[in-house]
Amino acid sequence: GEDVEQSLFLSVREGDSSVINCTYTDSSSTYLYWYKQEPGAGLQLLTYIFSNMDMKQDQRLTVLLNKKDKHLSLRIADTQTGDSAIYFCAESIENTDKLIFGTGTRLQVFP
Amino acid sequence: DGGITQSPKYLFRKEGQNVTLSCEQNLNHDAMYWYRQDPGQGLRLIYYSQIVNDFQKGDIAEGYSVSREKKESFPLTVTSAQKNPTAFYLCASKGSNQPQHFGDGTRLSIL
């Protein structure tokens, strides 16, 4: 079945770049998403990439997609303390509106 | 102000009691979703509805029920058959060719 995997924790110093990685199994995924969740809150859509793209950049965020390896990454440039949160990777399932989520990566930014 | 509203933010259930979580959206989205989030896990799909008066079971539907009588509303009932209901519940909605957008969640606890 479909599965999405992420590492559980990432700790970075303020001002450095953060790279959060994700692997997925469904090669027919149409879109891949990154969501951010702050404590006690819902999920905020950060960015998404269509499966026929390799890269998407949006201000401090860069998404890289390697379809061959089924690997997705989110790079946050100049990481700030306000970026501390849980980041979820999700893949869409072809011909449905359903998403499969990873377990989330907790990003901690220290001064 | 367009968005997805979940209420209440916190909810307590006694043993053997059914409780209903509210989800309302004014985004004119056709599709709506309910997810359950447990610590250290990703989101798991409970039920979803792609159109009014129709809904489908997700991966963990046992012990839950839903209705979709209006486009704007997709309430979730946690029944007494759900033996481990303590979790964070998230509602989402989705328009055509758009990503899913989430509410702020309801935290359900057992008394």
Image (cartoon, rainbow, N blue to C red):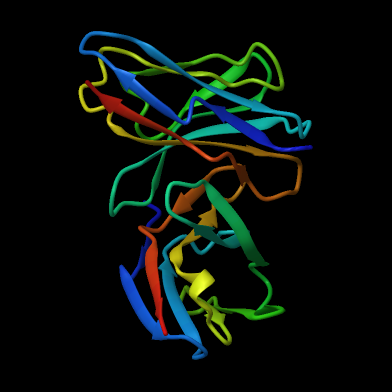
Rendered location of residue B37, percent (x, y)? 37, 42
Residue in front for this viewpoint, A17 or A34: A17
Residue in front for this viewpoint, A101 or B84: B84
Residue in front for this viewpoint, A38 or B59: A38
Task: Give the left or right position of residue A54, taking residue B91 as reference.
Answer: right
Task: Give the left or right position of residue A44, taking residue A106 as reference.
Answer: right
Taking the spot 45% from the left edge, 64% from the top edge, the residue there is: A85
Rendered location of residue B87, percent (x, y)? 32, 35
- Seen from this angle, which residue lies furthest front? A111
Taking the spot 53% from the left edge, 51% from the top edge, the residue there is: A43
Task: Give the left or right position of residue B25, taking residue A78 as reference.
Answer: right
| Residue A77 location, quadrant | bottom right
Is A109 situated above or below B59? Answer: below
Task: Give the left or right position of residue B42, taking residue B14 as reference.
Answer: right
| Residue A76 location, quadrant | bottom right
Taking the spot 47% from the left edge, 73% from the top edge, the residue there is: A70
Question: Which quadrant of the rendered structure holds the N terminus of chain B?
Answer: top right
Question: Which quadrant of the rendered structure holds the C terminus of chain B?
Answer: top left
The total number of labels drawn is: 0
Rendered location of residue A17, percent (x, y)? 51, 88
Rendered location of residue B92, percent (x, y)? 58, 38
Residue in front for this viewpoint, B60 or B93: B93
| Residue B71 location, quadrant | top right
